[in-house]
Image: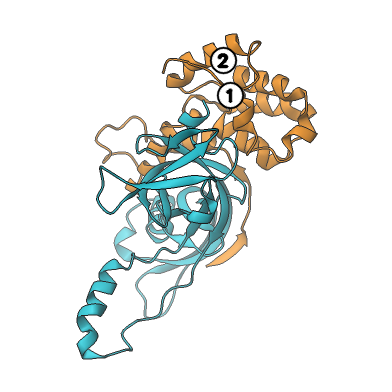
Amino acid sequence: MFVMSEIEHTLRLPPHLLNRPLNAAIKGELESLFLDKVIDKLGLCVSMYDILSIDGGFIFPGDGASTYTARFRLVMFRPYVGEVISARLKESTKDGLRLSLGFFDDIYVPVPLMPNPYHTEPDPEHKNGTRWVWEYMGENYPIDWADEIRFRVHTVNYPPLPVEQGKDSEQKDSEEKDSRQKDLKPFAPMVITGSLDADGLGPTAWWV
Amino acid sequence: MKILQSNAGVLTNCEVLELLKSRGAGKDPTRVIAAVAPSEFKVYDYLEQTVAFKQTIEIIHKFVEDCKKYDLANGEMLNVVNIRPSSAVEIDPIIQDCDSRMGDRIDEFLENVVQVLPPYPSQLESNEDTAEDKEETTDDQQTGVK
């Protein structure tokens, strides 16, 4: 699940941090820059592993702060395709499931990757939700909320940043646009598509 | 920002947990004093709920040594360490072509996994039942109490 990536970055150390030891100040700056952010193709930055080197300390003309070039290693969350991961159920709708790891929520299991054969029923506990039930050998196995669910990573996508959507300015559609924007999910820079369609996948309660 | 090496090494869940613990994640109930960010605490919470909670680096080294004879890919060994499967059906999605590559040695491999890697505390009772039932059933029809 976790991979180390080595990064080199030139950063400006603001003057108000000058009284702190250099290592701690640089670490703090880098953490505020990278922690909990998604880097394209590298994954979600979870933590800083260590700082390999700090060079520089030059002060550019007109600037009050010194600039350092730091080389460091970050712990990235980047599962490989085919990895089996345990997660919890976050949402269950007619389009499939959404799973969560606590620190990462954009894991989707679309309908084609659900265990086959299945049937769905409206969820008694959550309105607008759907409960998924797997049929196997005459038995019904539902996917419940309390279970720990194992899925296999199918793909990991890094969708590009969306362009502003304000170009179509039909005023009479403004209500429709508002309701559409409320339904739009916040942009997810990293999306994992998971599969439940194999032996051993799905809620652990089915197999243990 | 320049990426020098996008893959400088793979980390098991245990190693990430050790890293967070060394920064003081486990010891601070208020979660304000330790040098750990809130997002890192979320990762710590997730890892605490997995079997990585009970593992140590020595255990992982021993497991890797023991598994050399099975000729597994690095990714497969990593996955087994992170998930700790305790039955053949759980191993199936993790190891590709499990039947043709492992065949009969699956039980031996599972024994190894279950003995070397410590279980998550709530799994302890159901795993004891597995050891007893294993001679009778090849599939997992166990009725362990959780």
Q: Which mark is residue A202?
A: none
List x then y, in percent, for residue A127. 24, 51
Q: Colour of chain A?
A: cyan
Give the letter of the chain under mark 1: B
Left or right position of B14 against A180 = right
Residue at numbered disc 2: B130
Left or right position of A156 against B121 = right
- Relative depth, front residue between B106 and A44: B106
Q: Is residue A76 visible?
A: yes
- Relative depth, front residue between A57 and A190: A190
- Relative depth, front residue between B10 and A26: B10
Q: CA distance from mark 1 to mark 2?
A: 8 Å
Q: Is residue B12 above or below residue A158?
A: above
Say if mark 1 contacts mark 2, CB within 8 Å: yes
List x then y, in percent, for residue A20. 34, 52
Measuring 49% from the left and 28% from the top, which residue is drawn there? B51
Residues packed near mark 1 inside 10 Å, few (<14), some (14 to 19) or many (20 plus): many
The amino acid pointed to by label 2 is: Thr
**What kind of element bears circle 2?**
helix
Give the letter of the chain under mark 2: B
Q: Colour of chain B?
A: orange
The answer to which quarter of the image holds residue B48 is top left
Measuring 31% from the left and 85% from the top, which residue is drawn there? A166
- Relative depth, front residue between A166 and A142: A142
Residue at numbered disc 1: B86
Measuring 34% from the left and 65% from the top, which residue is drawn there? A186
List x then y, in percent, for residue A78. 54, 52
Left or right position of A78 against A180 = right
Residues packed near mark 2 inside 10 Å, few (<14), some (14 to 19) or many (20 plus): some
Of marks 1 and 2, which one's residue comes earlier in the chain? 1
**What kind of element bears circle 1?**
loop
Looking at the rendered image, the quarter that the N terminus of chain A falls into is: top right
